[in-house]
Image: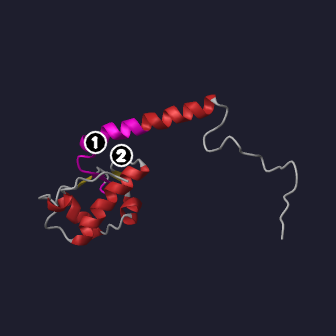
Amino acid sequence: MAWIDDRIWCHPKLVSIPDNAFRVYVNSIAYSSGMGLGGHLDPGQQKLVGSTTRIRATLVARGLWDENGDGRAIDIHDWKEHNEKRDERRRKDRERKKAARESAGTSAGRSPGYSRGTSAGTAHVDG
């Protein structure tokens, strides 16, 4: 789960926004963190976290989301300032685990016990 400051409820940028915009903002942080998006959400992802045109406009106007050049995608404001070290640590951890799997003779996405769909025998079910 994404880490969110325990004082978020009283942050000056957030105290007077509508409840649904607050929820979308928190959802966007959690979703971006969980999916490794680096604070960037395309229009489909914005919709997935509950955003509407009105909520998007509210979050951009309050400086919580930044428009991302193309006018459609957004970046969560100050994402890198607060999350860059953690994101980099996670990236390096994924790379280390992948290298360990490859050196152990298994490929990414397959467990060591993976079979190619054949079995040495037939299953027996009592009943």
* Element on which disc 2 rests: loop
Q: Is residue 73 visible?
A: no
Residue found at the far top of this picture: 103
Answer whether labels 2 and 1 touch (C-beta < 8 Å): yes
| 17 lies left or right of 85 | left
Q: Earlier in the sequence, mark 2 or mark 1?
A: 2
| 85 lies left or right of 127 | left
Q: Is residue 102 visible?
A: yes
Q: Which residues are magenta?
A: 71-90
Q: Which mark is residue 38?
A: 2
| Crowdedness near tag 1: few (<14), some (14–19) or many (≥20) residues, C-alpha within 10 Å | some
Tell me what residue is drawn at x 84 percent, y 50 percent. Answer: 119
Q: Is 86 contained in the magenta span?
A: yes
The residue singled out by tag 1 in the image is 80
Check the image and report above or below for 14 versus 101: below
Task: Locate residue 62: give its quadrant.
Answer: bottom left
| 21 lies left or right of 107 | left
Check the image and report above or below for 76 versus 87: below
CA gap, disc 2 to disc 1? Answer: 7 Å
Amino acid type, callout 2: Gly
Amino acid type, callout 1: Lys
Q: Magenta region, mostly helix, strand or loop?
A: helix
| Crowdedness near tag 2: few (<14), some (14–19) or many (≥20) residues, C-alpha within 10 Å | some
Residue 80 vs residue 57, the one in the foreground: 80
